[in-house]
């Protein structure tokens, strides 16, 4: 009688312990997967936020450069270009680490570097037009050279900013869809994790 009850009980305990062991391994693995997904999700949020700021700077600079072209075509000397060339510098480290399109990163960096240079040339044009350098003998000649250089360069930057912003908007749109899908998977994994622990607790 004793042995008839002992062996089934022992086998049941061994099977239960084995299943509990497998359940613990599976639960720990699921928790690690979910943690990794949350980390990736946070990285995607960071990139999306950084690209949003860059995109906004491109849009504002696009409008300002169009206004500058109009001013130069009317032979005016803008006092302050007010172009934002600092947006890339502020978010460069985040974007370089997390954005995988090397060509796009290089083009964004080059665009903002050109913005910084063109801003200095615009200040120089103002100085030779109205500022202290306007009294120099060659002031008019330098002003004309700058004028003829600034208009096509600004037009080129206007087109460049439009193309970059278009690409960034497409990336952000895809990223938003991926984030939503990622959240669903993460929430499902978390739910499974919680339910599994509840089952283990009941056992």
Image: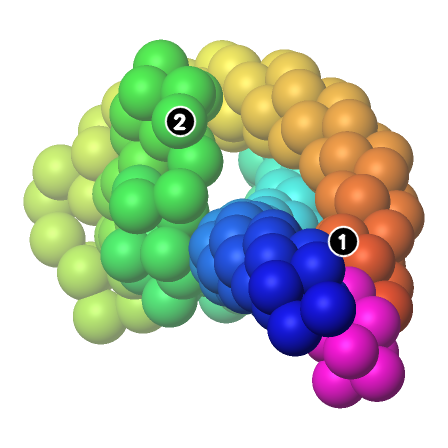
Q: Quadrant of residue 1?
A: bottom right
Farthest-out residue, bottom? 201
Classified by dominant secondary structure, the portion drawn in magenta counts as helix
Q: Which of marks 2 and 1 is nearer the N terminus?
A: 2
Q: Residues within 10 Å of mark 1 (few under 14, many from 20)?
A: some
Picture coordinates of residue 168 (x, y %)? 66, 31
Q: Which of 86 and 144 is in front in this view?
A: 86
Please state the extent of the stretch shown in magenta in the rendering.
196-203
With 94 as the anchor, is 59 left or right in this view?
right
Figure check: 164 above or below 95: above
Whether residue 102 is visible here, answered yes or no, is yes
Residue position marked by numbered label 1 in the rendering: 189
x, y percentage for residue 28? 50, 62
Q: Which x, y percent locates residue 16?
A: 64, 61
The residue lying at 37 percent from left, 56 percent from top is: 94
**Disc 2 marks which residue?**
100
Mark 2 to mark 1 CA distance (whole Å): 27 Å
Can the viewer see residue 46?
A: no
Does residue 16 sit above or below 159 in this rendering?
below
Task: Please tell me whether mark 2 sits on a helix, a strand or a loop.
Answer: loop
């Amino acid at each position: 009688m004793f042995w008839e009850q002992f062996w089934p009980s022992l086998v049941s305990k061994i099977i239960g312990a084995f299943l509990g062991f497998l359940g613990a391994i599976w639960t720990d693995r699921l928790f690690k997967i979910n943690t990794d997904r949350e980390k990736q999700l946070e990285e995607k949020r960071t990139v999306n936020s950084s690209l949003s700021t860059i995109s906004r700077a491109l849009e504002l600079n696009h409008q300002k450069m169009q206004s500058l072209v109009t001013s130069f075509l009317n032979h005016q000397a803008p006092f302050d270009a007010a172009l934002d060339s600092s947006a890339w510098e502020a978010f460069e480290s985040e974007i370089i680490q997390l954005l995988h399109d090397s060509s796009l990163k290089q083009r964004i960096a080059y665009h903002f570097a050109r913005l910084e240079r063109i801003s200095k040339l615009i200040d120089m044009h103002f100085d030779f037009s109205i500022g202290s350098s306007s009294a120099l003998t060659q002031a008019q000649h330098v002003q004309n050279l700058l004028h003829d250089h600034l208009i096509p360069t600004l037009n080129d930057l206007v087109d460049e900013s439009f193309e970059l912003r278009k690409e960034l908007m497409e990336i952000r749109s895809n990223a938003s869809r991926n984030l939503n899908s990622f959240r669903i998977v993460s929430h499902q994994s978390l739910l499974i994790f919680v339910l599994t622990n509840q089952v283990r607790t009941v056992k």
